[in-house]
Structures are given as C-alpha cells and as structure tokens.
Image (cartoon, rainbow, N blue to C red):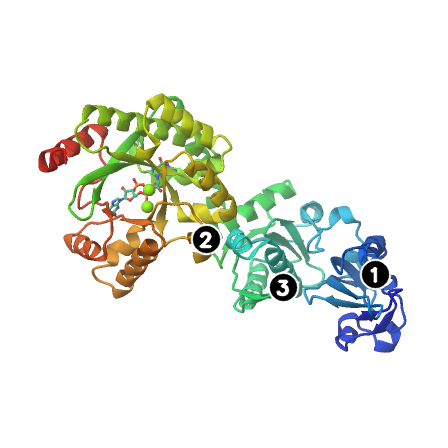
Amino acid sequence: MILDDDWVIQMMSDSWGEVLGVGQDELRWRRFTDLLHEVDRQDVADRLGRIGDGLSTVRFSCRIARADGGYVGLAWSVAHDPDHGLFYASAHETAINLSESEARLPDVFLDGLTGLPNRGLFLDRVAHALQRFQRKKSNQFAIIHCGVDRFSVINHSLGNRNGDLLLIEVANLLRRSTRPTDMVARLGGDEFGILLEDVNDATSPLRVIKRVQEKFVLPFQLHEHEVFASLSSGVAMSGEAYGEADLMLRDANMAMRRAKGQGGGGYVLFDRGMHEEAIRRLDLELDLRRALEKEQFETYYQPIMRARDGRLMGFEALVRWNHPERGLISPVAFIPLAEESGLIVHIGRWVLRAACEQMRHWQQAFPRRPALTVSVNLSARQLLHPEILPEIRRTLRETGLSPRHLKLEITESAMMEDADRAIELLTVLKRTRLRLMLDDFGTGYSSLSYLHRLPIDALKVDRSFVMNMHKEDGARSFVETIVSLAHALGREVVCEGVELPEQEALLRQMGVEYVQGFLYSRPVTAAQAEMIILEDQARFGSR
Ligand code: C2E
Ligand code: MG
Ligand code: MG
C-alpha cells in the first residue's frame, strides 16, 4: 500500500482485495489506522509516529479487518520516502486468519506472536469439553499436542527472527488444516495444541495429523531462507480417568515426546502403558537420587592411544552405576534421565572429582612417564549450569591436577542446543587452559559455520562412522572429510569405537592423531587401568 503523510491509502496492490475480501474502491482514501482492530490502533499510530525522527523504517504486527467481520493478523514493514511525503507499507503473507469471535478475545488469552489462543485459554476450553463429556459420554473429544522438531537448532542457526517466522507459518498451517470450530492454540515455545470436539474415535485426530504432515513435505519460505521442518504429535482421547484438563494435556505431551524420541515427524497415541512407563521412570529417578547419597557410582577408564605408535596418552572417564540388585548399569540407561531431572549436575560433579583425583594419583605414581590426561564427559545441562566454571577451578585446585591434563568432552548435539551460548561458555572455560573436545561428532546437526568459531581442540568422530569404515565407502569418505576439515581448522582428531586392526590401519593412513576402542581395551576399573599403564611403561619406557 502507498499511504500519504496522513496515513491515508493512496494506492494498493490487487491482492488486498483477496486478503480482505473488499474491492479497491472501498479501501482507497481511507485512513490506514481506521482499518485496524481497535486494540491495535494506538500502538500502530505510535510506531508510525516514530518514523522521521531518526527511523526510516518501522516494523510491527497488527490485526486488520476483513469484509466478513473477522480479522487477519499481518506483520508489516513501513518505509518512509521523505522526498515525496509518502509511506510504503508492505505486509508478510504470514497471516493468521482469525474468526470474528477469536479476534474479539481480550489480549490476555492471545499469544502475542501468532495471534492464536494461548495455553490458558486452551486449558479452559479443554476443561469445558471435559465437563460436557462427563455429562454425556457421547461428547467425546481429542487433543493433539504438537512440537516442531529441532526447533532450537533452526532458531539458533537462522536467528530468532526466522524462528519466529517459522512459528507463524506453522500456526497458519495448523489453522488452515483444521475446522473453524476446532481450537488451535500456542502452548508455548514451539508447541501447539489442537482441540477437536465431537469425534467418535482416534481416526479424526489422526486424519488431522496426516493432513498437517502432508504440508510439511514442502519447505517453509522464511525471508531469504528455505527450511524443511517436521512436526511431532501426541494424541490424548477423552476418557473416564481425566478429572482435570491438565492431566489430559500432560498425557498428550508425553505421547508427543515419545513421537520425538522415535525420530520426529510422526505421531503417537497416548495409552496407559506410557503412564506406567512414566511411573517406572519416576521410580528410577528416586533410585538415582539414593544412589548419589550412597555413592553407588563408579568411574571406569578407557585408554586413548596415539594412533601412530599405540602409545598410551590418557583415559576417558565413563561412569557406571553399581546398583545393589541390578548390578552394573550402563550410563546410556540413566544419563538421559539424569539430564532430564537435573541430577546430572550432581553426578557429573562426582565423576569430575573422582577422575581428577585418580589422574593426579597416577601422575604421582608414575612420575617418569610423560603425563597422562583424563577426559570427562560434560552434558548440556552441566555446561549451562552457572556454577560450572568455579566448580572446575575448585576441583583442579583441590586435586592438584593441572588443567593441561584435563579434557572435557561435550557432545555435538548438546552444543547445538544453544550454539551461541555454548560458544560463549566454552570460550570462558578455555581460559582455564584445559582442553575441549567435541564428542560424537557427525551425529549432531552442527552447521559448519559454527565449527571454526568453536574454541575446541579436537573432534571425536562418532563410532558409528568408524565401525563401518572398512566396509562402506560412504563412512570412509565421511571420516576422511572430517579429518581434513579438522586439520584445516587446526584441530586434532580422535576416533572412537575402533574394534578392528583394519580400521586402525585406515585411520593411521588418514593421519588421525588418537584412537580409542575395544581393540585396545574396554572401559575398565581404576585397578585394571593401572595395569595398562604398567604395560605401556614396559613397552615404551619413559620416552
Ligand atoms: P561417549 O562419551 O561417546 O563414550 C564412548 C562410549 O563408547 C562408551 O560407552 C564406551 O564404552 C563405548 N565404546 C568405546 N569403545 C568402543 C568400541 O570399540 N565399540 C563399541 N561398541 N563401543 C565402544 P558407555 O561407557 O556406555 O558410555 C555411553 C555414553 O554415556 C558416553 O558416550 C557418554 O556420552 C555418556 N557418559 C558416560 N559417562 C558419563 C559422565 O560421567 N557424564 C556424562 N554427562 N555422560 C557420560
Ligand atoms: Mg565421551
Ligand atoms: Mg562419543
């Protein structure tokens, strides 16, 4: 649209007729602000008023009236042309079409970004639906909880503005894929809820999900970027057991998490079994807390060798849970839960201290050999913990281990959860002069643009690539590429999961610096690790 100095519409493109359902003549000569939802008017007038004093362009969102009494939410960009005294106003097509009743809702029930009803309003509607259902059992309904897969990765690699646009697009798509009587709400972050009333069984929600998923096949157009995204959904059906809306939403959420866990892009229908599993997890969490108090954790050590000649360079500390009834439990079975519940911070603290103490002890026991290093795994949750830096410093000071002999391993996926913040934190950590490694490299979603900014010393190539290297060209060229990339960036490479001599030979040819895997040793107790040090000493002496 072109507006004059008084914001009166002079000219507009043809598409406005379609968007608002009115002819050009009806809009021409009307004041722009008069077309807006009355709640938005003052704010928009304020923003437009700011043009001129320093600003040449302003951006804002507002709702604009349609001929049928409803409103459409638009994101505007208005530029000033002082020479001609005109304003050029353009709006994104990322419009949410709100029904008349939705547009009349007071702001406290609306989500500011998408214009959709918010979580509070959604829960309120679900509570109503529950009451109707309790009065008459044929009033069945379903709720769908959806989440955009890996949204934080998209948000961090393309920036918040693009992330916001993607959410608006998704909101739009959900709105268009449902009936006007269904409620689509933004529950927070990248999560949306859909309430479908008067359904007979799970086929209706599944049909809605299929319809939505079909639209996710195409990329989303965000400013200058095109991105592919996928949506995970969980469904909960109305049932006797639900006394409160909260509980139903919780179950739909649990089903959605399960869908995400299956790789994303799919859906899961909630069932009782999931509930029982949640209870089992709660029990396990309780056990885990007790294990901390009773010191049931034990650190195992896996040797890391220099690839060139097989010299022992250090150990990776790997935690085990020595459960009184269930025996030795692998970290893959409890670390994810420990992360979710926050217990990882305590477990991690314990492992760090144990590993530093042990390494200091070995250095003193074997003073004539080149100093060994110890690698400790750090989860995302630990990295983001505000006390992490003072804690590492304190542990080094109290155990007497030099920071040069401590390596911290951070998984690539943990890094990418909040890459900018991680870079910041790692840069600060790096000042203590310890070494940083990117663990499980190749399985996360690093954008290469981050890689050279990361203050890391080495990449640890994930064992899934190393494992298949000798029989699959694809895996081999992947490792080869990573090695040259790492070397070009001045980083070293560690390959984990080396089980066969063929693999070792290939890695040596590629110039990989360090290797680790069952070929050399499984993770072992501290006492057994000491035997490995002795053997190495016997073979290489104190060189
Ligand atoms: P990771 O850091 O990538 O550790 C390597 C894992 O690969 C270890 O599994 C190790 O036993 C296994 N592995 C090593 N060589 C081979 C091999 O040749 N073949 C095969 N098949 N596997 C090999 P583990 O000990 O079960 O640990 C699993 C993961 O749990 C670790 O992966 C790490 O991410 C996490 N983890 C272990 N300890 C800790 C800890 O103290 N804190 C945190 N945050 N995470 C930990
Ligand atoms: Mg590791
Ligand atoms: Mg690893």
How packed mark 1 is, by other alpha carbons closer than 10 Å (few <14, some 14-19, many 20 or more), is: many
In what element is the residue under mark 1?
loop
Q: Is residue 143 above or below residue 533?
A: below
- At which x and y percent is residue 53? 81, 55
| View quadrant of ligand 1 | top left
Number of residues whose C-alpha sits closer than 10 Å to that of mark 2, classed few (under 14), some (14–19) or many (20 or more):
some
Foreground residue, 252 or 92?
92
Disc nearest the viewer among 1 and 2: 2
Type of amino acid under label 1? Leu
| Quadrant holding the N terminus | bottom right
Label 1 to label 2, Cα distance in Å? 43 Å
> Residue most toward the left?
538
Residue occupied by mark 3: 173
* In the rendered image, the vertical position of residue 281 relative to residue 61, given as above or below: above
- Going from the N terminus, do you reach mark 1 or mark 3 first? 1
Marker disc for residue 36: 1
Asked if ligand 1 lies within 8 A of label 3, the reply is no
Image mark for residue 450: 2
Of residues 443 and 87, the one drawn nearer to the viewer in this rendering: 87
Q: Residue at x 46, y 56 (%)?
A: 449
Residue type beneath disc 2: Tyr
